[in-house]
Amino acid sequence: MTFKEKVQGLIDDALTARQDLFLVNLSISDAFKISIDLDGDNGINLQDCIEISRVIEGNLDREEQDFSLEVASAGLSSPLKFVRQYVKNIGRTLKVKTTSSEEIEAKLTAADDEKITLEWEAREPKKVGKGKETVDKNVAILYEDIKEAIVIVSF
């Protein structure tokens, strides 16, 4: 069993006990620096990261392989990767880049196993007469058509 497989197994075991948390990214450098990014259905806090870190560190032997370990939450500026992340962010504004190079900044109103639904208002020329009118827009985008999606933080 490789070192990465062992670490992955420990993460899987730790997350089995915490079904509300999930792995976003695992990387292990050539110098055995383990970087783990987690997210949760209800967010993630420092204590969650500490618990997972302790489980992993407590089950690895530094005599066998020296390593460093970093467990963190997936940052707000990190692109969304999993359906669970989209579901968790329903109601928030996303900036979505599609595979057809289209960029949409809109409110995420729905997410299922196949697609997301975005809604926004746009100013468009009136169909009759001069001037512009506000129009409600709504689009469904398949996950396979999303190149990148990032949550826009508003204060």
Image: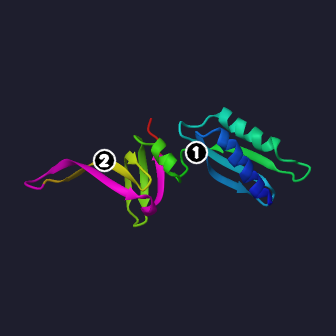
In percent of width and height, residue 145 lies at: 42, 63
- For label 1, the residue is 75
**Residue 94 sits inside the magenta stretch:** no
Quarter of the image holding residue 44? top right
State which region is magenta: 127-151
Apparent side of residue 108 relative to residue 16 in the rendered image (left or right):
left
Which residue is most to the left? 129
Apparent side of residue 54 relative to residue 72 in the rendered image (left or right):
right
Instruction: Please tell me how crowded label 2 is: few (under 14), some (14-19), or many (20+) other residues with Cα within 10 Å.
Output: some
In percent of width and height, residue 42 lies at: 53, 36
Numbered label attached to residue 120: 2
Quarter of the image holding residue 125? bottom left
SS of the residue at dot 2? strand
Apparent side of residue 93 relative to residue 83 in the rendered image (left or right):
left
Q: Is 125 or 84 nearer to us in this picture?
A: 84
**Residue 139 sits inside the magenta stretch:** yes
The residue sitting at 39% across, 67% down in the picture is: 100
Instruction: Please tell me how crowded label 1 is: few (under 14), some (14-19), or many (20+) other residues with Cα within 10 Å.
Output: few
Q: Amino acid at mark 1?
A: Gly
| Above or below for 113 versus 75 | below
